[in-house]
Image (cartoon, rainbow, N blue to C red):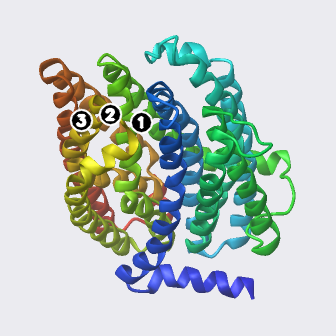
């Protein structure tokens, strides 16, 4: 019965109409992502009630926490690409072995990164421009968050296994549940309730750790026992070596590409810090809003790759290109609508997250300018996901380097020199325009060339 269900899902991705299939896969992800994003927004809202210093401190943590999350994302991308292709070609038994290897690998790698992070909190954040007044807040938050990061590894990669099998509903439920638990625990742990003491900013990190810990237990039960999408045992050395090599071949460049984002973000945060803690607080709020405003892009970046990977494994390259171009068109229209809504709500949004006029004015300025480029940024994100899905991780990595260090950092820096924060904000829009053009032309030409040549499946790995 389980094998029949898996085959049915595979056939859906390989033969059903593309628009309906992408809609079916993406809608559950949007719901799940909205709840997941409450991790950030709820944390930011309640921490903002502790004052500007606490809000500035948590804003400094975004690039660093995203580095750990990026490793999980990269490993998830590698996992999804490999397992999606195996499912598309009908080799579901080997897919289970790769799923097990991916989960073990993610736990080991994220655990190692978190351990390094714990011992380098002060030097890293000092390098980013954090002041002595903010360091106690940052240390309290990060010492717990790094431990929580290990709990995050299994659910994120486990969700990639589910999506690679064509199931996007269950990952959305897992994300929604995690967001709900985090939202309930945040005010209790931050401000205290009954016998539970007020933990301040550290309470936000504990709330996240508990939510992710529950997700870890559930996803292991689901994959190993209920769905049987992984082996209910540890892999031996030979199996671990085989699965890790193939997953890392895609996962490491993908993780590297994702890690470049917080590195570049850290550089820009340091530039923003030169304008004071109010500017950093506003930048942090804007960064959190970006995740919500780009919810469709993020959902598509999770649902589109499994579709592409399975069709790539079945040598349906025509469906790969059509699904990519259809997603791009929809994202551009949707994000333009979101920009209009944000502009209308800008003063209200700013008042929710800050009381000081300087901070609210800067948040409003951010909303009027930066979200204009979110649709173009969506093109870049979906192109990166599509490159990884067709097993071209180096292309995705190079595109990320171009976006961040050829366009984003230099243009925002120059903009800040001549036009202060106005120039920095407009610099992000200009950088997104230039990168989007490069991304769309690059992937479209690559896909058309592969269709024209019609290489045998074995040669398409090259």
Q: Residue at x 31, y 54 (%)?
A: 378
Is residue 105 left or right of 11 when viewed as pictured?
right
- Is disc 2 placed on a helix, strand or loop? helix
Contact, mark 1 vs mark 2 (Cβ under 8 Å): yes
Contact, mark 2 vs mark 3 (Cβ under 8 Å): no
Hey, which residue is sitting farthest front in the picture? Answer: 194
Is 19 placed above or below 323 here? Answer: below
Q: Residue at x 36, y 36 (%)?
A: 355
Is 428 placed above or below 171 here? Answer: above
Q: Which mark lies nearer to you, 2 or 3?
A: 3
Label whose residue precedes the other's in the sequence (1 or 3)? 1
| C-alpha distance separating marks 1 and 2 | 7 Å
Residue 106 visible (yes or no): no
Nearest the eye: 448 or 322:
322
Nearest the eye: 152 or 194:
194
Q: Which label sits on residue 51? A: none
Label whose residue precedes the other's in the sequence (2 or 3)? 3
What is the x, y in percent for residue 389?
A: 46, 59
- Is disc 3 placed on a helix, strand or loop? helix
What is the x, y in percent for residue 203?
A: 66, 38
| C-alpha distance separating marks 1 and 3 | 26 Å
Contact, mark 1 vs mark 3 (Cβ under 8 Å): no
Name the residue tied to disc 2. 404
| C-alpha distance separating marks 2 and 3 | 27 Å
Name the residue tied to disc 3. 361
């Amino acid at each position: 019965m389980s094998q029949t269900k898996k085959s049915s899902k595979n056939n859906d991705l390989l033969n059903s109409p593309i628009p309906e299939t992408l809609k079916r896969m993406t809608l559950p992800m949007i719901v799940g992502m909205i709840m997941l994003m409450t991790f950030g927004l709820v944390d930011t809202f309640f921490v903002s009630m502790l004052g500007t210093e606490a809000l500035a401190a948590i804003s400094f943590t975004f690039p660093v926490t995203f580095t750990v999350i990026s490793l999980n994302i990269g490993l998830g991308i590698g996992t999804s690409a490999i397992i999606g292709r195996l499912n598309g070609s009908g080799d579901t038994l080997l897919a289970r072995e790769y799923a097990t290897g991916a989960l073990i690998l993610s736990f080991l790698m994220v655990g190692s990164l978190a351990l390094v992070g714990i011992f380098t909190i002060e030097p890293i954040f000092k390098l980013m421009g954090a002041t002595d007044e903010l360091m106690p807040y940052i240390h309290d938050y990060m010492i717990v968050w790094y431990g929580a990061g290990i709990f995050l590894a299994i659910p994120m990669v486990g969700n990639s296994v589910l999506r690679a099998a064509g199931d996007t509903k269950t990952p959305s439920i897992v994300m929604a549940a995690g967001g709900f638990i985090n939202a309930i625990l945040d005010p209790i742990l931050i401000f205290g309730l009954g016998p539970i003491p007020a933990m301040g900013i550290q309470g936000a990190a504990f709330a996240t750790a508990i939510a992710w810990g529950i997700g870890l237990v559930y996803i292991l039960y689901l994959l190993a026992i209920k769905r049987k999408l992984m082996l209910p045992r540890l892999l031996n050395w030979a199996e671990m070596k085989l699965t890790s090599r193939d997953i890392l071949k895609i996962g490491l460049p993908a993780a590297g590409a994702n890690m470049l984002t917080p590195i570049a973000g850290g550089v820009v945060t340091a530039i923003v810090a030169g304008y004071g803690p109010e500017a950093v607080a506003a930048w942090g709020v804007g960064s959190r809003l970006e995740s919500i405003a780009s919810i469709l892009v993020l959902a598509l970046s999770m649902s589109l790759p499994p579709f592409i990977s399975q069709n790539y494994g079945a040598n349906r390259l025509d469906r790969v290109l059509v699904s990519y171009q259809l997603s791009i068109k929809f994202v551009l229209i949707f994000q333009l609508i979101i920009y209009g809504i944000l502009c209308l709500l800008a003063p209200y949004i700013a008042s929710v997250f800050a009381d000081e006029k300087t901070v609210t004015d800067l948040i409003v300025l951010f909303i009027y300018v930066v979200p204009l480029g979110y649709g173009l940024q969506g093109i870049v994100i979906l192109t990166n996901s599509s490159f990884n899905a067709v097993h071209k991780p180096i292309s995705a990595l190079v595109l990320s380097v171009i976006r961040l260090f050829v366009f984003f950092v230099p243009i925002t820096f120059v903009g800040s020199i001549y036009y202060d924060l106005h120039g920095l904000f407009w610099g992000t829009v200009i950088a997104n325009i230039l990168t989007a053009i490069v991304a769309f032309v690059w992937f479209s030409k690559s896909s058309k060339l592969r269709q024209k040549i019609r290489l045998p499946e074995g040669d398409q790995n090259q």
